[in-house]
Amino acid sequence: MLITAHTVIGFTIGVVSGNPYVAAPLAFASHYLFDGLPHFEVSSFRKPEERELKPKNLFEALFVFADLVLAAVILFLFRAHWSEASLLGSLFAVLPDFLDNVFLWSGFFHRLPLFDRLYSFHKSFHWTARGKDIFLGMVVQLFVILGCILIILAV
């Protein structure tokens, strides 16, 4: 999923729970659960067998940067709901991708048995939409993000 989607999901978990000790592990687990849904992300443009984590081109780097900016803008718009729980929720929801996919240190983490098992678990049911399914992946994430926003507004 996009960084934005994971961030908003984790933030929502934190807002709803109001407890950082509940929000952090639930948000972390939500990452794996929601990655099981068809979704669109920067790797949607790569072939499934392409495993290199380094951005292949300027488009991929800009895509990730725009995704980070969008997540930050949404969090800023909901700053009235900032709390230890909501901010920890947003952080823990993106933590698996941060550990697995940032090429500067992911190679190091993949050599550690615990993180390698988490990475294998992550990839075992990850559903990155490609080709004709990209639109489905976009729609799923849009509904997830909008649903979270509605939940936040209702709290």
Image (spheres, rainbow, N blue to C red):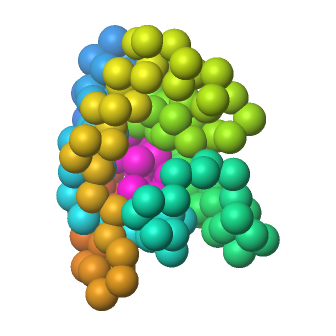
Q: Is residue 8 magenta?
A: yes
Seen at 61% across and 49% down, the residue is 53
Left or right of 50 on screen, residue 131? left
Q: Position of residue 94 (x, y in %)?
A: 47, 39
Q: Is residue 35 above or below residue 109?
A: below
Left or right of 132 on screen, residue 57? right
Q: Position of residue 21 (x, y in %)?
A: 34, 12
Q: Is residue 54 magenta?
A: no
Q: Is residue 19 visible?
A: no
Left or right of 35 on screen, residue 105? right
Instruction: Report the front residue among 130 and 68.
Output: 130
Left or right of 79 on screen, residue 58? right
| Quadrant position of residue 20 | top left
Q: Which portion, as a residue range, is magenta? A: 1-13
- Please name the predominant secondary structure of the magenta segment in the image: helix
Instruction: Report the front residue among 143 and 43.
Output: 43
